[in-house]
Image (tube, rainbow, N blue to C red):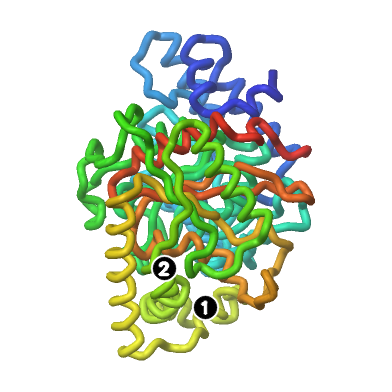
Amino acid sequence: MTTDLIRCDASELAELIRTGKVSSVEVVRAHLDRIEATNPRLNAIVTLADGALEAARAADEKLAAGGEVGPLHGVPFTVKDSFDTAGVLTQRGSPIFAGRIPAKDATAVARVKRAGGVLLAKTNLPEFSYWIETDNLLTGRTNNPWDLNRSSGGSSGGESAAIAAGMSPLGLASDLSISVRGPAADTGVVSFKPTHGRIPMTGIWPREPRRNWHVGPMARSVRDLALAYSLVAGPDGADGFATAPREFDTGLGASPDRPVRVGWLVDSGLGPTDAEVAATVRAAADALRTAGARVDAVDIPALERDDPLKIWTKLSTMEVKPAFAEVTAGHEDQMFSYSKFVAGMPDTSMEDYVEAEQGVERLRDGFAEYFHEYDVLLLPVTTIPAHEHQLGEFTLDGRTVGPFHVSSTTVPFNLTGHPALSMRFGTSGDGMPIAVQLAANLHADSTVLHIAALLETLSPVRDQHPAL
């Protein structure tokens, strides 16, 4: 039964608890036992939340007394350690914040608790959430549960590894350029970066540049992503980007009255992609075509005109470095090597900054044109499957690229704010998960979730787990 519980998704666990087939205490204890057995090899969990079992007992007592319960009543969840959690360490992966205990939950955390969720633990991240691998001087490196010698991605690599290894059914994470979708792809779980501003950033650090930061759930199933999104989306009166009503959506919904229109690509200006990753995207396109969607290979001229990764880098050096300087002043000796790298990036000239801003506008225009014709875009999540630790320059299709190239297919949607989802659809020759990415028009979040749910039913790799 314990093995079953750590493989159930959050929706099934909630149903089991609600119907009395299992208690919240049993579910929480099963995941705590899994953490004890597995985390020493992975280092995905960095802090256990005091009182998880007590909260589970309270949930069971409330249910037994006939009290009103939420959709996640008694279900454990984990949170990236950049989210404030009341009374629980939130150290942001840095010695600079060692021992920090917030007094108040981040908005997203409070909303999951309000739905009945039981905070189980905090998960690892790179210092300040700024890197493509999860490693830092305070809580160390997270390993991939599929291969301990490989990365679980960054910056939400602790969250992705915890869910993939059965230590958590559901988590909250944040995404500046790749950080929700890339780690999910590396570990074979699902994740969703909604339209920018749909989930408030209140109580999450860092927020600079907040116009590119997104909050999103990670889970074991698409239905859990949809459930979590429905619970945490909507304004909170504190985040100026979170203004649209929770119910606002311009997507297709679950029952479109015409065939879904899907365009797919593996390059179109985004640079070289691993052959197995490209083949997985084509396989997903074929599956959707077989399921009745209209599917076309496409190019997006705007992506070929403006390199999103170069735009992101130019903007970040102007917007991120001042935040680094403020926090790290006097603590430079405590900074991890990746943080020092970001802080030391060359400054962007004002001319290049303005050109980068115009590049973002051109990308938005290009996607507006594309999504006028298509409902969704299907493309890679990362340009390579999960890589070995400490990735430097690497070669793809005869071209040498830098480590940030893994995010060339995710960063466009941080610049423009479009919703995008990561889900596994294949396996590399050496046994690592390969995912595909689905993106839709601004505020068409239901479209992404609907098509992902369809694709999930067609997946050749459903219910595959790492052998830990």
In the rendered image, residue 285, in percent from the top left (x then y), is placed at 53, 44
Q: Between 375 and 176, which is closer to the camera in this rendering? A: 375
Is 243 positioned to the left or the right of 279 in the image? left
For disc 1, the marked residue is 342
Q: Quadrant of residue 234?
A: top left
List x then y, in percent, for residue 61. Answer: 46, 15
Q: Which mark is residue 256?
A: none
At a point 22% along the width and 40% down the height, the residue shown is 248
The amino acid marked with disc number 2 is Leu
Q: Quadrant of the N terminus?
A: top right
Residue at disc 2, secondary structure: helix
Q: Is residue 418 visible?
A: yes
Q: How many marks?
A: 2
The quadrant where residue 31 appears: top right
Q: Quadrant of the C terminus?
A: top right
| Residue at (30% x, 70% y) in the render | 362
Residue 40, horizontal then vertical, whole percent: 75, 47
Structural crowding at the residue carrying mark 2, measured as other residues with C-alpha within 10 Å and reported as few (<14), some (14–19) or many (≥20): some
Q: Residue 432, how many percent across, how many down?
A: 72, 49
Name the amino acid, label 1.
Val
Check the image and report above or below for 267 versus 223: below
| Residue at 45% in and 54% down | 174
The residue that disc 2 covers is 303
